[in-house]
Amino acid sequence: MVGGGQLARMTAAAAVGLGATFRVLSESENESAALVTHDVTVGSHLSLSDISAFAAGCDVITFDHEHVPGPILAKLESDGILVRPGGGALRYTQDKLAMRERLIELGVPCPRFAPVSTLADVAAFARGTWPVVLKAVSGGYDGKGVWVCESAEEAEEVLALGIALMAEEFVPFRRELAALVARSPSGQGAAYPVVQTVQVDGICREVIAPAPGLDPDVAVEAEAMALKIAAELGVTGLLAVELFETADGLLVNELALRPHNTGHWTIEGARTSQFEQHLRAVLDLPLGSPALAAPYTAMANVLGGDDGASRFDIYDRYLHVMAADPAVKIHIYGKEVRPGRKIGHVTVPGDGARSDPAELADRARRAASYLRWGKEDGD
């Protein structure tokens, strides 16, 4: 796996159960996955020589992020290295404009969009109606590279950054959903139940699986849409499709071709975790069951606070969280704590007696808050 972040760290744990030899190309020995993986190569995902040397010792390579340049991916594939997902599919997560154009070709509903490079372009797109969403065509993630502009003056500030941008309509959605699917080289597909997500400042904060009160027909539509996208884009491995649920139906917001934050609940809440599923797919093994292991599961991200706590202070807070709610499952990524940085997550699976999704979400939220702040009433 190219990339040494928390996704690689959790994929490494899944590889143990499969008996797969798992190697990581990490930018440093202190990255999240490098701290727990036996076979670590330190190198850059921006270096063809580093990735080529790493890939030479692998049967197949995959990724925990989308930032390997397209020319490097093309060279690896031309050299006969199995790259899953391939560069052709990854292009649509690296270039948001290309992704939107391709989805429209496929008849997939998306927000109205257009490339923009001047204030006149943005004004013409806005048609006098604000806000307008500006997005970096490449390089954005976790809210970075996305600006909700309330006025022409705010748009002008973003344009001054001098990067390639696209404009999208601001969507008054009811809620945000995510559909997670897997696809193997043999063409087998599997779809997890559609989940509800809560995003704050562009960062996923909470997930409830399955999405409470979602019309079964809409759930089937979302799963079918995600499977169609995976097949048409030639995805191998996981595909996460972030969706807006609106009064007029579903709109696709973003795509990710890898394990995804909205699928962390699957470790405890599904028969097959997203991390094992990704490995099964890229190794062309039969896919595992994506069925629920609990009626509902809630997940909340643990963010770094600004109280000066270190990652070692977080462990001192385990005593309270574990004693207060023994059903809470804690996953800490071994990352240095910085304000607002994702440093872990907690999940709370329901059972027959305690499966109210609102209650599960509240329990997950309180546990994550205590791990972040040392108290349960923080943000």
Image: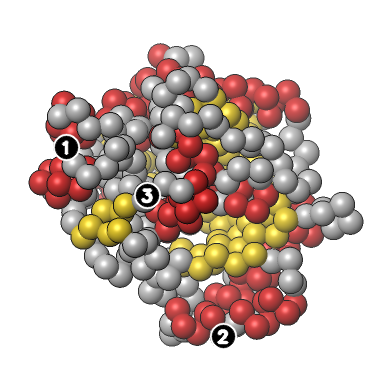
In the image, taking residue 262 as reference, residue 325 lies left or right, namely right
Q: How far across and down, in percent of the image, does residue 201 sit?
A: 48, 56
Q: Which residue is mark 3?
A: 21
Secondary element under disc 2, as helix, strand or loop, is helix
When asked about the image quadrant of residue 173, the answer is: top right
Alpha-carbon span between mark 1 and mark 2 = 43 Å
Vertical side of 186 occupied by 289: above or below? below
Vertical side of 157 occupied by 255: above or below? above
Q: How far across and down, in percent of the image, does residue 375 sit?
A: 64, 81
Alpha-carbon span between mark 3 and mark 1 = 24 Å
- Circle 3 or circle 2, nearest the eye: 3
Residue at left 15%, top 29%?
79
Q: How far across and down, in percent of the image, does residue 342 sit?
A: 46, 63
Q: Please tell me the numbered disc located at residue 72.
A: 1
Secondary element under disc 3, as helix, strand or loop, is loop
Q: Are marks 3 and 1 in contact (CB under 8 Å)?
A: no
Q: Nearer the viewer, residue 147 or 120?
A: 147
In the image, taking residue 271 as reference, residue 91 lies left or right, namely left
